[in-house]
Image (cartoon, rainbow, N blue to C red):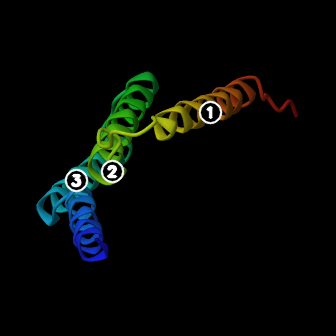
Amino acid sequence: MSQHHAGTAGHDHHDEHDDHGSLKAYITGFIISIVLTVIPLLVVFETSMNKTGVIVTIITMAVIQLIVQLFFFMHIREGDGPKYNVMALILGLFIVLVIVAGSVWIMSFNSVVQ
């Protein structure tokens, strides 16, 4: 009985390893991440786009970058167990949203009068 159990445990570990993605998926995610990082840099340094357009481009690329990171590196779509990682992600996104919105609000109303 213990031999059968040991064989099953080894097989489960192998299946678990396969679920974590292939080298091709990691390389694809890495290349997409690099492109999504370079686009806002080029927009900021090389265009004459207005301020609103630059901010919208940066935010759009950041959201796409988040999605790429979740699917290619964090494997958010995988797993049959409880969705604690999804609940933790939602909490984390809420915290980030509060911090970013608060920072933008503070920077918007921070006028230094001399």
User: 93 and 76: which one is in front?
Assistant: 76
Establish if 23 lies above or below 76.
below
Residue assigned mark 1:
100
Between marks 3 and 1, how big is the CA–CA gap?
25 Å
Who's the residue at 26% across and 58% down the image? 20
Amino acid type, mark 2: Thr
Q: Quadrant of residue 96?
A: top right
Q: In this view, does 112 lie to the left or right of 25?
A: right
Tell me if label 2 and label 3 are in contact, CB under 8 Å.
Answer: no
Q: Any mark on residue 29, and which?
A: 3
User: 85 and 62: which one is in front?
Assistant: 85
Amino acid type, mark 1: Val
Q: In which quarter of the image is residue 94?
A: top right
Q: In which quarter of the image is residue 3?
A: bottom left
Residue 84 in picture, x, y percent from top left: 51, 38
Between marks 2 and 1, how big is the CA–CA gap?
19 Å
Image quadrant containing the C terminus: top right
Tell me if label 2 and label 1 are in contact, CB under 8 Å.
Answer: no
Residue 40 in picture, x, y percent from top left: 34, 43
Which of pointers 3 and 1 lies earlier in the amino acid sequence? 3
Between marks 2 and 3, how big is the CA–CA gap?
12 Å
Q: Is residue 91 left or right of residue 34?
A: right
Q: Any mark on residue 37, and which?
A: 2
Mark 3 is surrounded, within 10 Å at the Cα level, by few (under 14), some (14 to 19) or many (20 or more) other residues, namely some
